Amino acid sequence: MDVEAILAFGYDLGANGTRKLQEADQFGRLPGIAWYDADTEHPTEDAEPYLLTAAGVEYSSGSDLVKLLKDHLGVWFVSYGWVDEPKYLLAACTLKCDWDDEAQPIDLAKLDEQVVQHELDTKLANALELLGVTPTQQRPAWLHCVRGG
């Protein structure tokens, strides 16, 4: 079993049945959101191409959508939790550590400087506006989570 610790700056969007979005109904569905398809197992499959298209980024089938999101918008989706029941973040910066990596010091002040220097708040806000969703989380934050499976 692979286990990975993740420190990400962004928003926790939740999981399929428990979305952390103001637009979600009681069942976690997103009625009225243009890119949302209730039959899609992983919502990022719909959100990634929609976000790129809304931002005017051209791509072809087989393109690495995560790389395109990082390069053009400065944000991407990160899955966390158990691989069979993932939850999602919208992130503008991530640090990862596998279960067998050595402990690494983290300079929190330097990370916060990067947030300001690279305008990560603005990049996240722009992506949320393009997606037409509002997180229940008040503002972006450093989020610590685990992915395993």
Image (tube, grey):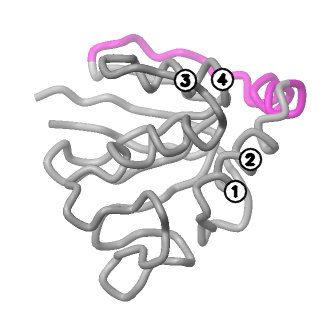
The residue to which callout 3 is attached is 58
- In terms of sequence position, does the residue under pointer 1 or pointer 4 come before the other? 4
Badge 1 crowding class, 10 Å Cα cut-off, few under 14, some 14 to 19, many 20 or more, is few
Per the rendered image, the range of residues in magenta is: 100-117
Residue 134, compared with residue 46, is above or below; it is below
Residue type highlighted by circle 4: His
- In terms of sequence position, does the residue under pointer 4 or pointer 2 come before the other? 4
> Magenta stretch: residue 64 in it?
no
The residue to which callout 1 is attached is 129
Residue 58, compared with residue 18, is above or below; it is above
* Callout 1–callout 3 Cβ contact below 8 Å: no
- In terms of sequence position, does the residue under pointer 3 or pointer 4 come before the other? 3
> Magenta stretch: residue 114 in it?
yes
Say left or right for 116 vs 8.
Answer: right
Say left or right for 71 vs 60.
Answer: right
98 or 127: nearer the viewer: 127
Residue 77, compared with residue 25, is above or below; it is above
Residue type highlighted by circle 2: Asn
The residue to which callout 2 is attached is 126
Badge 2 crowding class, 10 Å Cα cut-off, few under 14, some 14 to 19, many 20 or more, is some
Badge 4 crowding class, 10 Å Cα cut-off, few under 14, some 14 to 19, many 20 or more, is few
Tell which tag, 1 or 3, sits nearer the viewer.
3
**Image location of residue 83, percent across then percent down:** 19, 42
* Callout 1–callout 2 Cβ contact below 8 Å: yes
Label 3, label 4: how far apart the Cα atoms are: 10 Å
60 or 121: nearer the viewer: 60
- In terms of sequence position, does the residue under pointer 3 or pointer 2 come before the other? 3
Tell which tag, 3 or 4, sits nearer the viewer.
3
